[in-house]
Image: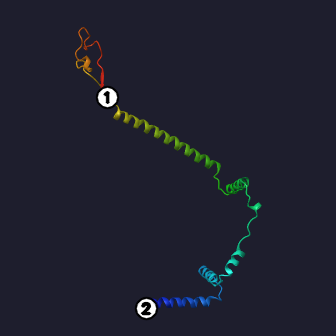
Amino acid sequence: MPKKDKEAKKRALRRERAKSREGEVLTGVGEQEQAADEAVKAASVAEAPSQAREKRAPRPTRAEERVTAWDRMVAFFTEVKIEAKKINWPPHDETVKSTMVVIITILFLAGFMGLASVGFEQVARRLFTTQTIQAPASVPTNPAEAVPPAGSPTPSGDHPAPSIPY
């Protein structure tokens, strides 16, 4: 029970401080928020709707509500012009130097990427191309030609041997 007693004492102390501050000028943000909360609690339920109506801004008329696309576009470009004047633009010579650095960097990278592409292409060609091996003249490559018909030329030199891919 001692914990509940401590909490009750703290609440009582806070109430006493709040009562003593009612006449003081509020300076802290927390105090202003507390005073606003107390004012809301103190207002009666019957007064709240009428106070809310008094605080509302009057509704614009239909003529004021009509904002055309042209009006919005003009307002946009006016704001763009105002913001562009606030930009701290670099001097001309600094702009030229920066542009040259960018162009040289792009050319260097383009050359490097081109050489790398050619190199990778050569490596890929050597790895993935098939080699052709010439079949010996004495070994028939076509089963129909295994036994040559009588009177036909021999494969010894009359016809070149076909290549076989491996």
In the image: residue 20, left or right of residue 112: right
| Quarter assignment of residue 160 | top left
Q: How is the image coloured?
A: rainbow
Q: Is residue 49 above or below residue 111?
A: below
Question: Is 114 situated left or right of 85 in this image?
Answer: left
Within 10 Å of disc 2 (Cα), the crowding (few <14, some 14-19, many 20+) is: few
Residue at the image point whose x is 45% and y is 89% from the top: 4
32 with respect to 144 (left or right): right
Residue drawn at the location 58% of the way across and 45% of the way down: 99
Image quarter where the N terminus lies is bottom left
Looking at the rendered structure, the kind of residue marked 2 is Pro
- Give the residue type at disc 1: Gln
Task: Name which of mark 1 and mark 2 comes first in the sequence.
Answer: 2
- As drawn, the label of residue 131 is 1
Between disc 1 and disc 2, the foreground one is 2
Residue 29 % position (x, y): 61, 79
Element assignment for label 2: helix
Residue in front for this viewpoint, 25 or 108? 25
Task: Tell me, for residue 2, which label it has, or none.
Answer: 2
**Cα–Cα gap, marks 1 and 2:** 94 Å
